[in-house]
Amino acid sequence: MKLPVSTHDLADRIFRSHRYFWIKLVRAAITSFLILVLSFFMIHSSGNPAQIFLGGEATPEMVAAFNVRWGLDRPLQIQFLSYLQQVAKGDLGNSLLRGEPVIDIFFTHLPATLSLMIPCALISITLGIALGFVAAMKKQTTIDHLMMIGSTIGYSLPNFFFGVLLIFIFSIVLGWLPSSGNETLAHYIMPVLTIVTADIAIFTRFSRSSFIDVYEHPYINNFKALGVSERRILLQEALPNASIALLSISGFYVGSLISGAIVTETIFSWPGIGSLLVSSMKARDFPLVQGLTLILGFSIVGVNLLVDILHGIIDPRIRKGGK
Amino acid sequence: MDVQMTLPDEKILSVQNLCVTFQQKGKDIEAVRDVSFDLYEGEIFGIIGETGSGKSVTCKAITRLLPDNANISGSILYRDNDLLKETKRSIASYRGSEIATISQDPIGSLNPIKTIFHHLKQALLRTRSDERDYRSRSEHLLQEVHIPSPRTRMDDYPFQFSGGMAQRVQIAMAMSTHPKILIADEPTTALDVTLQKKILKEMKLLCLKKNVAMIFISHDVSLVGQLCERVAVMYHSSIVEMGNVDDILTFPLHPYTAALLAAVPKIGKKETVAAISGDSLAGDVTVEGCDFAPRCPYAKEVCHKEKPPEISVGQRIVRCHFPLFDGVKSAQPAFMNTRAIDADNVLMKASYVKVDFPILKTGGIRDTFTAVNEVSFALRKGEIFGIVGESGCGKSTLAKALVGLNTPSYGMIEAFGQTLHTSGFSYPEYTKKVQYVFQDPLGALDPRMTILDQVAEPLVIHSVCDAKEALLKADQMLTECGLQSSLFHRKPYNLSGGQRQRSLVARALIIEPEILICDEPVSAMDVSVQAQIMNLIKDLAHKRNMSVIFISHDLSVIFNMCDTVAVMYKGSFVERSDVDTLFFNAKHPYTQQLIDSIQSFSSSEIRVKADESHSVHACAFYERCPKRKSICAQKSPKLITCGVSHEVACFYS
Ligand SMILES: Nc1ncnc2c1ncn2[C@@H]1O[C@H](COP(=O)(O)OP(=O)(O)OP(=O)(O)O)[C@@H](O)[C@H]1O
Ligand code: SF4
Ligand code: SF4
Ligand SMILES: [Mg+2]
């Protein structure tokens, strides 16, 4: 007869069997907290916000009024606690310049960024993996060498240079494409091209080496020796294994997309989060900068957590606590 | 049945003038040179030879499983079709269904992120049978290779299987497709002696029954002798002798074959085995004369200048200027080693070490499986301590616990004044003194680094010396471990199994540890390299007064290597004593079976274990024990002293 399990035991078991996931969750929580702390202190680290915002000729009265208005006169820990409270309620404060809630501003700019980033991500990931696979299969041949040269050029071209070059050729010299805004489909061509050239190159290189790695494993040969078709080996054995490595880079990549947006959006005056961040920094609109930092930070943590969880699901060695 | 068939069986495969060269960085490596042999229906043809002699490459060439940088020439006729002329697509149709392969590296041959069932299903899909019930067919396949509780185990992943079990899965996969030819590349190196024989016997039976021909690659000369009808001996990419197995083993004509036979470890004689002197040539070295000349005791001037001709003597072929028609020169006297173990100086002490693993039973119930059960021992300075037992008995788990890779759930491991797995324990400090060599050489090496860098690495990590000096030392160490300098800059995948294992030994020995833990360090090697590595470890143990824990499933290896030995069964030590006592006076029925099974190939039939239902308190060996009585089903015997330094766990010993 087994004794009924106590709740404490149960909790212990759940923790043990899902140890990996719990660890990842706790890490994500700690990182999120650090981001909160960092974003809070960002305002304070850059000197006196009132002085910065109001400029050099502000009178002490103006500064005092400013501080009262934004609660900057209270002790630091109280400020932090009320900041946490606000964030918990989903209130990231109001923009200094526009007076609107930061959250609302963020959401009005989000669609523009997503409409650019999602297609870019899809194109770079799928095309990059496909090209990487081809290069891996043709490893050490002329095709492979050409592809590697191409990708080296692709990813060593800085986005700002390539973007400006495109504008110069297609907007200024040829006059075919609009150079700023996001109104029509034609507006998308150059920004997408700018982002995608670098990113495909990165993915091609990375997936090439993951595929080469996987295909060198003896189990691939073992399935070949059984007469299992190449296609089946790719889909059933190689791809799942390669995807473990590819998943990690995809996580990084989605994170870097956000920062990548800053450059591209600025060049093409794209009304997205990237431009918003730049303009708010220029204007020293610190609640907006703070809010955006927080959201972007959280979303990167979220993406990484998602990647870790998927990782655990794909790889039984992690899930089942193997080596 | 005893009547020999007068007509020769039909030739099923004919390999003619096979040459394989690898192109690597502009250099050509000749891995197989002018190899010709025939395979007849239903026969078992053996290939023996040192590591790197080209055995695996020859076999991979048959089904064209070599990487793209391999250049293959010659012809391989399978039922009159030249396999080398087939297109890439059509060669795939031969694989599995006509010619199946079982490869060397058991764990690596299974996809780490797929279940065992997935593997078997992929194999079964190739059979084009109407039977759709893959699960029950897989269960049946696993049963055939004696995997216990196959129904639940097939949902496990390869990392949950021991090396031996993984190899059995591979055998099941290969058998499932009903091939005409089975190429078995060292299929049982990872298995324990008793199981090895059982499996090989079954493989032999299957070959007889279904008229399947087998090419059996092994470095175990005695296995080849027992299993095969004809054998080819390979040395440095070519066949130096070929013929009937009994003739070759009793009356070798080629000096290399003679040396190979002399290097087989013999039971009961505790002596340094006669390693073949000198190194075999590296793959990319070509010599003008006979390849064996630099090591051959019979070499004359002509041997260094001219390639020896192929001489046929009846059914036999030998490639030598001076075949040994007059028999072998008497072997040099073996160097006897006697040395004192410092009885009072205990370096490592394990007390009641127990290691549990969580397992998932059917219905999602979690349970634990005890892989190592309250094992205790003391390792003294200078002692070579052997642990022997069949695959899955917990040897590797224990070894991993000793180096801190597994955490015991109970018990204590103390060494050098530290207690493992406690707070204050300094791992870097510990690894400087305790090094290990593990079973799976591929898994232990970084596929992206050259072996020279990998051997130098520990020196840099432990900041023993700077990188430049480390490389120099690594160079020396690799040479000492019998690797040629031309291999130093290769990556692990481009080395043969034995070469990889030597690199691992070099990496472990380079920081001059006080304790070396070896888990099956020689099981992937052929006898002559086995002898070299064993002698190397022994020599170093003597010279540096180093202690060694040596784990193996091969009792003959243990007898040759060790001073003291423990026999492990299902997680516990069942007998422990010094080597001589164990050999001449084994008390435990299991030990006796092990010793019997090395001495004769087919004796001691082992009772098949079927029920797992009797009391959990029974003696672990109950199911297989010929001496069991009713008390054994109720109580489990503890290790008790039965003589001077002799302990045994059995009620009726
Ligand atoms: N892909 C490769 N590229 C270059 N050289 C290779 C490659 N594969 C094998 N070799 C070389 O070919 C030679 C023969 O190797 P092979 O694997 O056939 O040895 P083996 O006789 O099977 O040895 P073992 O008993 O250790 O398995 C070795 O020198 C090895 O280093
Ligand atoms: S040819 Fe000469 S060197 Fe070669 S094996 Fe024969 S005797 Fe020895
Ligand atoms: S205790 Fe009994 S079952 Fe166990 S080994 Fe001894 S005789 Fe056999
Ligand atoms: Mg081999």
Image (spheres, coloured by chain):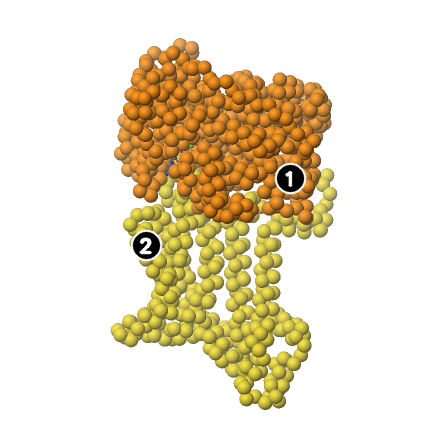
Disc 2/disc 1 C-alpha distance (Å) = 50 Å
**Which numbered marker is on residue A147?**
2
Q: Which chain shows up in orange?
A: B
Establish if B151 lies above or below A204. Answer: above
Chain letter, disc 1 residue: B
Task: Say which quarter of the image contains residue B411.
Answer: top right
Q: Which residue is mark 1?
A: B356
Q: Residues within 10 Å of mark 2 (few under 14, many from 20)?
A: some
Picture quarter with the C terminus of chain B: top right
Location of residue A133 in the rendering, given as x and y in whole percent from the top left corner: 37, 50
Secondary structure of the residue carrying numbered label 1: strand
Q: Residues within 10 Å of mark 1 (few under 14, many from 20)?
A: some
Chain letter, disc 2 residue: A
Secondary structure of the residue carrying numbered label 2: helix
Location of residue B485 in the rendering, given as x and y in whole percent from the top left corner: 41, 37
Q: In the image shown, does B424 or B321 lie closer to the viewer?
A: B321
